[in-house]
Image (cartoon, rainbow, N blue to C red):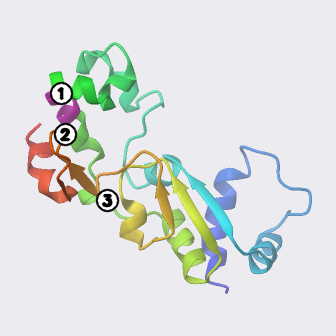
Amino acid sequence: NFQLIPLLRIIMARYNRRRQKLKTVNTIEDVVELLKKSNNIIVLTGAGVSVSCGIPDFRSENGVYSRLDEFDLDEPQQMFDMEYFRICPQTFYSFAHELYPSNYEPSPSHKFIKLLEDKGKLLRNYTQNIDTLEQKAGITRMVQCHGSFAYASCIRCGYKVPGNYIEEAIFKK
């Protein structure tokens, strides 16, 4: 179980600065003990686990939402609004290539979650990410809260295809 320690060090260093620790968890050894005795662990993930892989986030100073003028949008939600897509699909394609996961690899956080799953400790990973790095890491006990690039569906008939079928259209911009 010592293979967990390097990943725990990375995760603890990143998050200990942002929130108060549990009073009973003060060292990496405490975290290891907590993980050893815990089952049915739920992991919530967002952009932070993928930004280190090079995938841009949405809300930071240089994130996708900070560039609304570049895409001629009034609201950030228009980027993902189906009615807006029907009228102006080129807006989606003009930024989707930046988020498309073809050249990205899972982060240490993704690998840690996979390790929890392999050890039978992960109940579920709920992710806001659309980048499919959880699948690439092999995580199966997962819910993609906002969908993903894993599949694409026809907006007329609902026909579903693997995401790589639309890759060429995404990279044409």
**Element under disc 1:** helix
Question: What residue sits 68% from the left and 57% below the top?
Answer: 13
- The residue tagged 2 is 155
Crowd around label 3: few <14 · some 14–19 · many ≥20 (10 Å)? some
The crowding category of the residue bearing disc 2, from other C-alpha atoms within 10 Å (few below 14, some 14 to 19, many at least 20), is few
Marks 2 & 1, CB-CB < 8 Å contact: yes
Where is residue 171 drawn, in percent x and y?
Answer: 12, 45
Q: Is residue 70 magenta?
A: no
Q: Between 64 and 28, which is closer to the camera in this rendering?
A: 64
Q: Are the residues at dot 3 and dot 1 in contact (C-beta closer than 8 Å)?
A: no
Given the image, on which type of amino acid does mark 3 rest?
Tyr
Q: Which badge, 2 or 1, comes first in the chain's sequence?
A: 1
Nearest-to-viewer mark from 2 and 1:
2
Residue pictured at 26% horizontal, 49% vertical: 100
- Side of 100 relative to 10 (left or right): left
The segment highlighted magenta reads: 89-94
- The amino acid beneath tag 2 is Ile
Where is 135 relative to 3, above or below? Answer: above
The residue labelled by disc 1 is 86
Q: Earlier in the sequence, mark 2 or mark 3?
A: 3
Q: What is the CA distance from the residue labelled 3 to the residue labelled 1?
A: 29 Å
